Amino acid sequence: MPRLIVVSNRVSAPVDPAAGSAGGLAMALSAALKAYDGLWFGWSGETVETFTGEPKFEDRAGVQVALVDLEAQDVDEYYNGYANKTLWPLFHHRVDLTAYERSYGEGYERVNRRFAEVLAPLIQPDDLIWVHDYHLIPIARDLRRLGINNRIGFFLHTPWPVRQLLVTLPHHRRLVESMFAYDLIGFHTEEWLDLFRDYVVSEARGEIDGLGGLECFGRKVQTGVFPIGIDVDAFTAARDSREGVRTYDRMAASAAFRSMMVGVDRLDYSKGLEERMLGYEQFLHDNADMRGGVFLVQVTPISRDDVDTYQDMRARLDATAGRINGEFADMDWQPIRYLNRSYRRDQLAGIYRAARVGLVTPLRDGMNLVAKEYVAAQNPEDPGVLILSRFAGAAEQMGEALLVNPFSREELSEAIHKALTMPLEERIRKWQALMQVVRDTDVSIWRDAYVKALNALPVGETDDAPFHRDGRADAA
Ligand code: ADQ
């Protein structure tokens, strides 16, 4: 087996896997790195006065990691800037929030180059290199310029934007051209891959070979759909653990025979939190007879506090939750419990299990793992109902959920009503179909399928690729 090098902005290899707080993705990649005797490379999260280019090596619960410190300006322009204020909103179709600052683009290019320069000497001839997410799109081009001919794969965790919006990005062509330095590009869904193809064919005049291959900028790249999932066994074990059961009991007792609905999301405008609360408010207006019999637990830890947009959103959500509670609450009932904190995975599993309805209503989302966690946590004999946005990547596989347009309050209100009144037989039938999907897309299946596809590609294809030799991308 070749060695695997995982490259991502942050290295989330767990220090102590038993602590149970590491996400499924971190656990899956850690397991892969142990199996392939690999290395996880990325930013340490630390800043230094002057960039040294010296990686720090650590062993994290059996996983070798190599960490790089960045200068404050790097973090500002590359991470807070281009990644979080340019690409993230653009890829989630929020052109109104997308900042196009020249310094951000320069910082992004500089940090990718710096990462490539530190990483290149660590690469051995047969290593497979697997790059994750939008922070590091151009790194393969920079590695090629440094003479790295290994197989390099890229996986995008977010959606790919429609061509008409992508072209609002200055130097969009340069960004896409840099992707042709990879050997394999993976997306969560057919839809994101179709949108990528559309840009390549319609904007850059590339060609499709019908077998997942794309030819453009004088280079060929293989593409594929690899839907990510959760670690089902680990998640169900967390659900059945002492803490999982204890949390379930606590939630069930506090529900006092009322139907609980749950939303679990990072504080991000892509998650549709305000729209969800407004849909619930509509439901309370539409169904006066059901008020008092239902409540929403919204779990949203605060993150990315340094970005103004997130502070505004937080203020708006606080106000919306407060207004709905103020308007509808009674002496013994509050319609929304808005919890601004993070929970351990076992506690989260217990919370999901206690909820009759799972509300997963992002406005746009690469996949959305909360939808899969909610399903995996359910009691097979009395399962809850998943309400899922049609704009989450997960909707492509989870068609048995109640699919909704999260921009429509009426649709949300009707779906909540339908979920709360759904007969047991129908709930079980839907849940069984959804649980099958959750199992079929287990994170280990995702990981192994990707690594296998990358490993199966021929090496040395770069010989006829002028891109790698003369750095033609610079001219774009
Ligand atoms: P995210 O946007 O972070 O990921 P998601 O897939 O929903 O979105 O994953 C969030 C994870 O964080 C889940 O495992 C969830 O349990 C956890 N989480 C959220 N709130 C929490 C809380 N309060 N306490 C503890 N844990 C919490 C990006 C993309 C997604 C894509 C994933 C994986 O935006 O579309 O599905 O990567 O590729």
Image: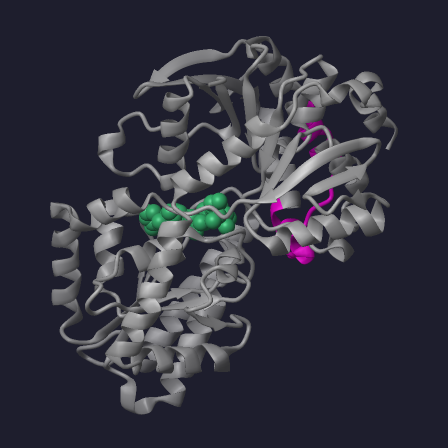
Magenta segment, which residues? 88-110
Residue found 85% across the figure and 25% down from its top: 472
Q: List x then y, in percent, for residue 153.
A: 60, 30
Left or right of 221? Residue 206 is right
Name the quarter where the C terminus is drawn.
Answer: top right
In the image, is residue 104 part of the stretch drawn in magenta?
yes
Position of residue 16 relative to residue 400, above or below, is: above
Nearest the viewer among 409 and 203 is 203
Nearest the viewer among 149 and 260 is 149
Residue found 32% across the figure and 59% down from its top: 375
Give the quarter of the image for residue 107: top right
In the image, is residue 243 part of the stretch drawn in magenta?
no
Residue found 24% across the figure and 82% down from its top: 292
Give the quarter of the image for residue 257: bottom left
Give the quarter of the image for residue 255: bottom left
Nearest the viewer among 197 and 315 is 197
Position of residue 51 relative to residue 396, above or below, is: above
Magenta residues, dominant SS class: helix
Q: List x then y, in percent, for residue 363.
A: 54, 62
